[in-house]
Image: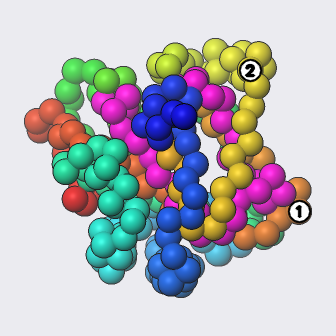
Amino acid sequence: MPTNLQKLENDGYYITEPICDTALIGELKNLLSNLQADDNDAVRKKNGDIFGVRNVLSISPVLWPMIKGSPIFKMAQELLGDNARIVRSIYFDKTINSNWKVPIHQDNSIAVTQKHEVEGFAPWSVKAGVPHTQPPEKILDKMVTFRVHLDKATEDNGALRVISGSHKHGKMKQDDIVKFRNQSEIDLCEVDEGAIMVMRPLLLHESSAGQSPSRRRVLHLELSADRLPTPLEWHENYS
C-alpha cells in the first residue's frame, strides 16, 4: 500500500480522511465567513459580496495560532520537516450566488514581499497589492498545497478535478495544457468536511461550476520548507 508521500510523488496529490474535528471546522467557518477584507484582497467578488480572499493569515491574526496548534500544521511538518512554513493563504467560498468554474491550469506563481530581479524568477505581476512571480521549477517541485475543506466537496458543488501524475511534466504552456487535458483521464476529487486535499502546485487541475450548488468553502494553504534566494522573501511566512 503506497504511503501518502509516495502518492504525492507519483500522482501529485492525495486526499486524507477528516483530520480536523468539528470544533476546529466550526471555528474556521465562523472566522473565515465573517472575514473583514477590503476590495484589494478580494480574489472573487460579486454584487458587493466577497467570495474569495487572499492573504487571510495576514488579514486575520487569530487564524495562525488556530492552525499552528491543529492537525493541519502537524501534517505539514510531517511532510516537509521542522522548517515547514505557510507562504500563501487564500479562502474560497463557492456558493449558489457565486458559482464559478476554473479552467485547467497549474499554480506556478508565488507571493513575495518585494520585487527584485533575480535570475529564474519571471514574469512578475501584482495581486491584491502583493508582488507575485513565477519561480524556477525546483522551488515549485518541493512546495505542497493543502486544501482544507470546510464543507464536503462533491461533483454537484464544484469539486476539483485533476490529471494524476501531470506534475511530473513540469511547467507547461497553455496550449500544451489544453492538449494534455484532451488526451488524459480526469480524476474527480470529492473531499469530506474536515479532510485535506494535498497536492503539488504543478498538478494540472480545474473545477466546474456546481450542477446543484451548495456551499463549498476551502482554506487554500501553500507551504514550503525552503527560503528564497536573497533578497527575495516570502510574502507570508508562518512557521
Residue at 81% across / 52% down in the picture?
155
> Is 153 included in the stretch rendered in magenta?
yes
Report the quarter where the N terminus lies: top right
Between discs 2 and 1, the one toward the N terminus: 2
Picture quadrant where residue 55 is located: bottom left
Which percent across, then down, holds residue 215?
73, 70
Q: Considering the numbered disc 2 on the image, is that residue within a helix, a strand or a loop?
A: loop
Decide: few, some or many residues near mark 2? Use Cα within 10 Å; few <14, some 14-19, many ≥20: few
| Figure check: 40 above or below 117 | below
Q: Residue furthest front?
A: 1
Q: Residue furthest left?
A: 230
Report the quarter where the C terminus lies: bottom left
| Figure check: 60 above or below 155 | below
Which percent across, then down, holds residue 94?
69, 64
Q: Magenta segment range?
A: 139-167
| Nearer to the camera, 189 or 130 | 189
- Name the amino acid, label 2: Ser
Which percent across, then down, holds residue 201?
47, 36
Mark-to-mark CA distance, 2 and 1: 26 Å
Which percent across, then down, holds residue 80?
29, 44
The residue at which mark 1 appears reads as: 212
Q: Which mark is residue 197?
A: none
Decide: few, some or many residues near mark 1? Use Cα within 10 Å; few <14, some 14-19, many ≥20: few
The residue at which mark 2 appears reads as: 184
Can residue 188 be seen in this snapshot? yes
Residue at 51% across / 26% down in the picture?
10
Residue at 21% across / 39% down in the picture?
226
Residue at 47% across / 73% down in the picture?
38
Q: Residue furthest right?
A: 212
